[in-house]
Amino acid sequence: MPVIGMESEFNVWLDEVEINPEPYFQHPSTFIDGPLLKREKSSVQLPTGGAVYFDRGVIEVVTPVIELAPHCTARMVRNLWEQIGFVRDELTKWGDRTGHTVRLKAYSSHYNISHERKTGEWKLARLLAYLLPVPVMIAGANRRSTGVGVRPRGERIEVTVDFTPDPGLMVATATLVVGITRAVMEWPSYELSMLDKLGIPVIGGVIPGKHTTRKGFLTKDFHYERSPYTSDIDAPAWTDQFGRTMSLRQMARAVAWHFRKSIREYSDPFSFRLLFAVLEGRAPSLLDLPDRPKAYEDVGNLCRWGMVIDELREFDLTRRMPHPPAHTIDEFVLERAKERERHPVEVRPGKADPAPPPIAAEPPPPLPVRVMRRIPARYLDRRSISLLEDRKRDRRKSTDRRRRQYAIPFPDRRLTRSAYEQVFLKLVSGSRLRQDGELLTPVGMKGWYHAVFRRSDGSETLLTIDELLRKMADWV
C-alpha cells in the first residue's frame, strides 16, 4: 500500500557536553532495558513499534511505515512522539542509574512519502523544492531555521526540515507536506511550467541549490534576497513569479488552499483547522516568536505528545510576547549574514526558473479567495483542554493498563492505529505467530517490509508485513 513515514534526529548532551552517541553508547541496548527486536547494524525495534539508531553523530528515531488513509498524518506524528517519549524515558532511567544527565536537543525531521510511479523522481523533487519551502516554513520552521530540502529516494520522496517541538504544529506540517506531495505526484507533468499554468505562487527569482550532503535539492535562507526566517512574515514584501506582492503568510496560505482537498484527504479535522488558522494568522506560527522556542533544547521533557509549548500557549495574537525573551537572535542574524557572503547566490528577477516560457498573453491569475463566514479573531487551541479531559478519563479507567501506559492526549479520541502500526506492535509484543501448526517467534526485521521469524527447529523464515496483516488473528 502507499505509505508515509517519519524520522527525527537529535544531538545528545551528556552532563551538558555534546557527544557523539555511537562511540559512547556503542548500541541502543546500553541505555534501553528489556529484550529488543534486532534490525540491521546497530538499530533496534522499540516496544512502541518504531526504531532507534545512531547516525552521523546524532541519535535518530523512526516510525514504522503507515499506510495512506484519512488521519494518517496524525497517526504518523503520534507514533514518532511515542518513540521519542520511550527513548527519553529510557535515557532518564539510565541517567538515574549511572549518575549522568542526558539531554536530547532537536536537530531535524524527515517526512517520507512513497512514490509509486518510480519515474521522474528528480524532476518531482526539483518541483517540490520550489513549491514547499514557504508553506513549510510558516507551518513548522523557526527563527533559526535555514532551509527546506527535498530528496528523491527511489520509491519515495523525502522532505527535510527543522524539528518542530510543538506536536500540534508538527501534525499540521506533516499534513501540509503529505497533502501537497501526493497531489503533485498525480500531475501529468513535473515541469516547473506547471506552477505558472496552475497559478500557484512561489517567490520569484529563487532557485534551489544542490543538497549539501546527498542527492537532492536544498533551498537555503541565502538563496533569497533576505532571510525569510528572520523577516516579518506578515509584511507584504515578497514578489511572486507573476509580479504580485504579498506576505510570506499570504503566499503560504495561497499554496495550501490550492491543495486543500488533498490535504484534507489525509488530515484529521483538528490539524486541518490548526494548519489554516496558522496560515491565516488566527493562530501563531513559530516564526511569529522572537526566537526559537526553548523546547528545542530538551525534547521529551520540555515538549511531549499532547503538550502545547510554553511560547505558543502564552502568545498574544496582537504579536506581543508576555515576557521579554531571555536571549536575542541578533548573533544568529549576523552569523547567517556572513554565511550569505561566503555563498553568493544570484537571485534572478521575475520567473522562478528560466526554462518555462513567460506567460505574457494572459494577466497574472488572481490569488485564491476563500468564501466563508466571518473568521473569528482568535483560534482556540483545544489541546490543553483535551489533556484535562483525558486525565479525568484515565482516573476513571485506572484498570486499563494500556491506557495508563500509553495515554493518547489528542483532541480526537477516535484516532485509531493504522493497519501497519498494528502489525509492528504485534511483532514487538513478545507474542508468537501460528502458521501451519507451528509457532513462529519474531527475532528481527529486515528493512521495513520483512520480519524475521525463528521456527521450532531453529531455522529462520521471512514474512512481509502484508502477509502478517492477513494473519493478525493468528497471533498467540
Image (tube, grey):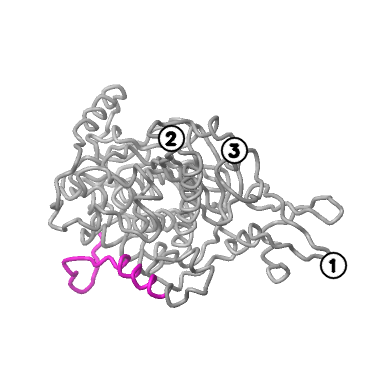
**Disc 3 designates what residue?**
27
Sequence-earlier tag: 1 or 3 = 3
Which residue is nearer to you in this view: 297 or 468? 297
State the residue at coordinates (31%, 63%). 274
User: Residue 354 is drawn in which quadrant?
Assistant: top left
State the residue at coordinates (12%, 57%). 318
Quadrant where the image shows the N terminus:
bottom right
**Disc 1 designates what residue?**
437
Q: Is residue 114 above or below residue 229?
A: below
Could you give the CA–CA distance between mark 2 and mark 3, rounded to whole angstroms?
16 Å
Q: Is residue 419 above or below residue 116?
A: below
User: Residue 243 is drawn in which quadrant?
Assistant: top left
Label 2, residues with CA under 10 Å away: few <14, some 14-19, many ≥20? some
**Disc 2 designates what residue?**
14
Number of labels in the image equals 3
Residues tagged 2 and 3 counted as in contact (Cβ below 8 A):
no
Give the extent of the magenta segment.
368-393
Q: Secondary structure at mark 2?
A: strand
Sequence-earlier tag: 1 or 2 = 2
The answer, for residue 284, to whether it is visible in the render is yes
Look at label 3 and name its amino acid.
His
State the residue at coordinates (26%, 23%). 341
The x and y percentages for residue 375 are: 19, 69
The x and y percentages for residue 320 are: 13, 52
Residue 427 lies left or right of residue 18; in this view the side is right
Look at label 2 and name its amino acid.
Leu
